[in-house]
């Protein structure tokens, strides 16, 4: 197939169908009639020799061939758009848009208060949405433009994505003030003798640390296991349990819940927190501004380091 065999506007309709899964929504987004969108889809089907989208109760679902086309077409359209608008400026104070960031519940606790306040100050017309990094279709949603950035340890985001390290942090032991362990340096024996609150954070790098602790120090007493970090402060505040958490989370919970923390007595690998974004928005002025804001607020340093394409650098 040659480029002359297809109209660029048809690819725009294709990419919108990948995102919306609805002919009526695509028509509204592109200010077209529904018959016009349907006619374009019919032309695409003839061109590619595939149904591309099949009508189901859940919407217009892409065929395996359409899913195969989605990434290169989305990437190509993004690069064309960026190239045509590379001299345009993004003015945050005048922007009217929403931003969606994938993060863990730890991320919501650590990042959102400061991030929301900075957006309120610099970009009052920009609203913020979050989704979990553990969602199964995160890669597809980022390729389709539904998710702007993802923050966390995310090994599943490789080809087609850029990443940059936001910071590294150690794991610590968190417990209430006045706990029997509050006035001493923790030893492995202290840690093993304590009652533990265990957080099983599926689909994140933090879950791997707990697996490591279970394999190497099974003698500990697990009193309670929960699937997320949101309730950690409330639970530790009223019990004698301790929890293994990241240092930035511990710092966020100390004051509101009257807690304290100590260095972990077990040698654990540091947690590396990265920011990921799709290659097609790499040169977008709006995305560059958003990434810069996040690194200014939370980065381990203020120097501007070149981001690595994950597919080529293998990081």
Image (spheres, rainbow, N blue to C red):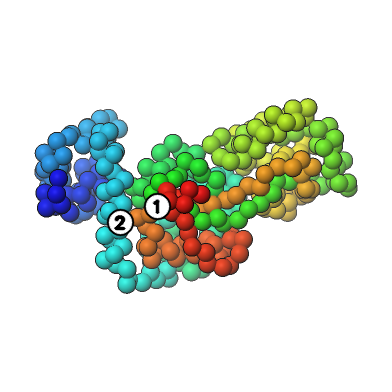
The reply to whether the C-beta atoms of the residues labelled 2 and 1 are less than 8 Å apart is yes
Task: Residue at 54% x, 48% y: name it.
Answer: 152
| Image spot of residue 266 (x, y percent) | 76, 40
Q: CA distance from mark 2 to mark 1?
A: 10 Å
In the picture, residue 176 is in which quadrant? top right
For disc 2, the marked residue is 78
Above or below, 95 against 70 in this view is below
Horizontally, residue 247 falls left or right of residue 54, namely right
**Residue 155 visible, this orientation:** yes
Q: Which mark is residue 177?
A: none
Name the quadrant containing residue 43: top left
Q: Which mark is residue 278?
A: 1
Residue 53 falls left or right of residue 35: right
- The one nearer the camera, 312 or 182, is 312
Q: Earlier in the sequence, mark 2 or mark 1?
A: 2
Residue at 15 percent across and 52 percent down: it is: 3
- Closer to us: 32 or 77: 77
Q: Residue at x 29, y 67 (%)?
A: 85
Numbered disc total: 2
Where is 168 relative to 68, above or below? below
Q: Which secondary structure, mark 1? A: strand
Residue 85 drawn above or below residue 268: below
Residue drawn at (56%, 68%) of the image: 303
The x and y percentages for residue 286 are: 39, 64
Look at the picture and state if 202 lies above or below 119: above
Label 1 Cα neighbours within 10 Å, binned few <14 / some 14-19 / many ≥20 = many
């Amino acid at each position: 197939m040659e480029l002359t065999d297809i109209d660029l506007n048809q690819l725009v309709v294709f990419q919108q169908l990948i995102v919306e899964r609805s002919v009526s929504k695509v028509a509204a987004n592109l200010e077209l009639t529904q018959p016009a969108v349907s006619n374009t889809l019919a032309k695409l089907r003839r061109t590619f020799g595939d149904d591309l989208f099949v009508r189901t109760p859940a919407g217009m679902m892409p065929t395996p061939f359409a899913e195969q086309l989605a990434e290169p077409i989305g990437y190509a359209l993004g690069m064309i758009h960026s190239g045509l608008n590379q001299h345009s400026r993004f003015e945050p104070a005048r922007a009217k848009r929403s931003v969606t960031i994938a993060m863990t519940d730890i991320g919501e606790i650590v990042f959102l208060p400061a991030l929301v306040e900075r957006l309120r100050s610099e970009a009052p017309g920009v609203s913020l949405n979050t989704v979990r990094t553990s969602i199964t279709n995160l890669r597809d949603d980022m390729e389709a433009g539904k998710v702007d950035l993802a923050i966390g340890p995310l090994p599943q985001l490789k080809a087609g994505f850029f990443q940059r390290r936001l910071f590294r942090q150690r794991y610590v032991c968190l417990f209430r003030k006045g706990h029997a362990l509050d006035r001493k340096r923790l030893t492995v024996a202290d840690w093993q003798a304590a009652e533990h609150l265990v957080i099983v954070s599926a689909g994140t790098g933090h879950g791997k640390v707990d697996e490591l602790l279970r394999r190497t120090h099974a003698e500990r007493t697990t009193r309670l296991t929960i699937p997320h970090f949101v309730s950690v402060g409330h639970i530790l505040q009223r019990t004698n349990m301790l929890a293994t958490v990241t240092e930035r989370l511990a710092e966020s919970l100390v004051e509101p819940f009257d807690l304290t923390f100590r260095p972990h007595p077990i040698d654990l690998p540091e947690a590396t927190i990265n920011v990921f974004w799709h290659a097609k928005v790499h040169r977008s002025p709006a995305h560059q501004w958003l990434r810069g804001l996040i690194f200014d607020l939370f980065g381990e340093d203020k120097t501007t380091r070149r981001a690595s394409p994950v597919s080529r650098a293998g990081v």
